[in-house]
Amino acid sequence: MNLEDSNRISKLFNLFNIFLKGVISIALNFPETKFYYAKRATKTIREELVLIVKERREAIEQKLSDSPPQDLLSHLLLFPDENGKFMSELEVDDNILIMIFAGDDTTTVNFNISDKVFTNNKKVGNIFWLKMITEQKDIALSGGREYLNVVYEVLRLTLPIIGSWKEVLEDFNYQGYSIPKGWKIYWNVPATHMDPKVFPDAKNFDTSRFEGAGPIPFSYIPFGGGPRMCLGKEFARLEILVFIHDVVKDFRWKLLIPNEKIEYDPMPTPIEGIPILLQPSEDIT
């Protein structure tokens, strides 16, 4: 959104963190609950977004700038759908809110968990490192299958988003339970990714799962599935690949708290922040 006001940025940042805490919470809307504070924060965020959208729309209409910022907000305001209809301010607000939610902490979580997974699976990390040294490849650009398989397995084991809410569109039965139309259900990704019938020895880091034909259809769903699959999935994979490449190429590291616990609130967060000890690679080659 190209915000430059530090006070406004700080305000939105603090409100967004409150909102995150209540994304996956019991819907008890009374004081002192996460849901209550999340709803209040969301209301204030929307009010602030309405002002930001109005300011940008006025700037565009009055041509206060020869070249409006080429960001998401400008695109949402300037480009109609296939029927020539422009988004309402509420729709613009919704899109910005979901984009911030989907693209902010999720990336940081992936980086943190990649560190943890690599350290706990030194054999994989060593192979990754030796391959780069011997082949002299920039894996971020080459995108070799063996490197991508590492990213796929990282995402299988620990996801930035563990599921989402859906509304039941028609009655159905599942494992002896009748689920009526209109109910809200929560689909849980780890329930599939850690199913030993789908992924044998599911807790073990094993990139060979993605060799050949790979997992059976609809069993590997870190980005969801169907028409609502995450739009940023390829960008997320590339980010993780570049991060792993740059860190593994230049450093070796160890966890200062090897068995650090991870809590989901709502994203996987190491409770101590994954403190690590870095050592430049040239010191050990």
Image (cartoon, grey):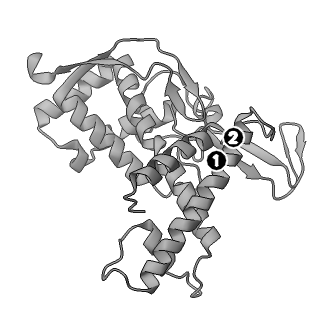
According to the picture, the residue beneath numbered tag 2 turns out to be 37
Quadrant assignment, res 208: top left
Residue neighbourhood size for the residue with mark 2, other residues' Cα within 10 Å, grouped as few (<14), some (14–19), many (≥20): some
The residue under the point 56% across, 88% down is 84
Q: Disc 2 vs disc 1: Cβ atoms closer than 8 Å? A: yes
**SS category of the residue bearing label 1:** helix
Measure how far apart labels 2 and 1 are at the Cα level: 6 Å
Residue farthest along the front direction in this orientation: 7
Question: Badge 1 local density, few (<14 within 10 Å), some, or many (20+)?
Answer: many
Q: Secondary structure at mark 2?
A: helix
Foreground of the two, 263 or 71: 71
Q: Quadrant of the C terminus?
A: top left
Residue 199, can we see it? yes
Q: Quadrant of residue 128?
A: top left
Q: Is residue 131 left or right of residue 59?
A: left
Q: Amino acid at mark 2?
A: Tyr
> How far across and how far down the image is residue 214, in percent?
47, 41
Q: Position of residue 284 (x, y in %)?
A: 12, 16
Q: Is residue 223 above or below residue 259?
A: below
Which numbered marker is on residue 41?
A: 1
Give the left or right position of residue 94, taking residue 209 as reference.
Answer: right
Quadrant location of the N terminus?
A: bottom left
